[in-house]
Amino acid sequence: MRPEQTYTQHTVPAPDDGETPAVSVRGLSKTYGSGAAQVTALDDVSADFRRGQFTAIMGPSGSGKSTFLQCVAGLDRPTAGQVTIAGADLTRLSERQLTTLRRDRLGFVFQAFNLIPTLTAEENITLAERLGGRRADRAWLSDLVEALHLRDRLTHRPAELSGGQQQRVAVARALLHRPEVVFADEPTGNLDSRTGLEVLRFFRQAVDDSGQTVVMVTHDPLAASWSHRVLFLRDGRLVEELARPTADSVLARLAALEGLA
């Protein structure tokens, strides 16, 4: 039997170029329940995410990956800590202010596509713009549709689209308003390998060409290899960072975290 490995808390430093991070997380904690039934999902996590950077979040099952993403994206309230996006401390915003920030400055892609079944693909893509009283940038919409191979599917409703097509619609919806930060939770989990690679390639292109920030939770080492760096969580704590990841290096780190290497 291998001895249990002990991991110390790791803090991802702020960019050393003087640039304010797109997202800054300090002392983030999240607990559920109380007393003997209390469960700690996140334990004093701190990290920075710079503009124009693609970061993957990984770790063993139950490590707190999705909870971290939900709290950082303002979809769930942390028990303690601070999350700053676009100069705003999310923990101090009202629900209305959070809704406006998420709608105007953030993008979201989830494993569940969250499309409105009664709307066409184009109507789903432009939904946030219409809800916010904005006109969609038709030229950018056309570029998205072309890049994601959706041109001949715009009038179809979700039930008439394959899973991969629905996910591409969700990606287009997330990127249409040119958000400063895109949060993605297992975005390729329901996709075949070809479609998953198309989605990952488009995320990387959005980062490299448009300077957007992407934070993606994934369990897939190949998906993580498209990122600039990988942050590893274990038992709700940030324990390691890997720059310039490859599928093999990510797999090796995961095996070590799970006590298999």
Image: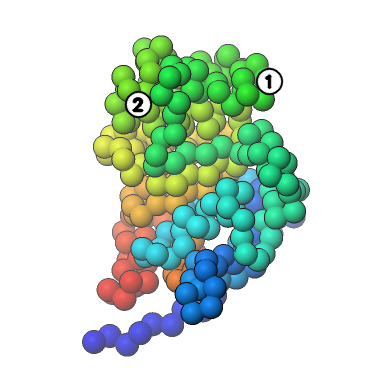
* Label 1 element class: loop
Indicate which label's residue lies in the foreground, 2 or 1.
Answer: 1
Where's residue 240, x and y in %?
48, 68
Q: Which of 28 and 93 is in front in this view?
A: 93
Any part of residue 116 in sight: yes
Where's residue 201, x and y in %?
41, 36
Mark 2 residue type: Gln
Q: Is residue 235 placed above or below 104 in the rendered structure? A: below
Quarter in which the C terminus is drawn: bottom left
Q: Give the residue number, with chain letter if any, for mark 2.
A: 165
Q: Residue furthest left?
A: 1
Residue pictured at 44% horizontal, 41% vertical: 110
Q: Give the residue number, with chain letter if any, for mark 1.
A: 133
Residue pictured at 32% horizontal, 23% vertical: 159
Name the side, left or right, on which 108 lies relative to 248. right
Residue pictured at 62% horizontal, 20% vertical: 130
Is mark 2 in CB contact (under 8 Å) with mark 1?
no
Any part of residue 239 in sight: no
Q: Distance between the residues labelled 2 and 1?
A: 27 Å
Q: Is residue 44 placed above or below 50 in the rendered structure? A: below
Where's residue 13, x and y in %?
64, 64
Residue pictured at 69% horizontal, 51% vertical: 90
Q: Is residue 173 placed above or below 30 in the rendered structure? A: above
Of the image marks 2 and 1, the number of the one nearer the N terminus: 1
* Label 2 element class: helix
Which corner quadrant of the image does residue 126 belong to?
top right
Mark 1 residue type: Gly
Q: Nearer the viewer, residue 223 or 66?
A: 66
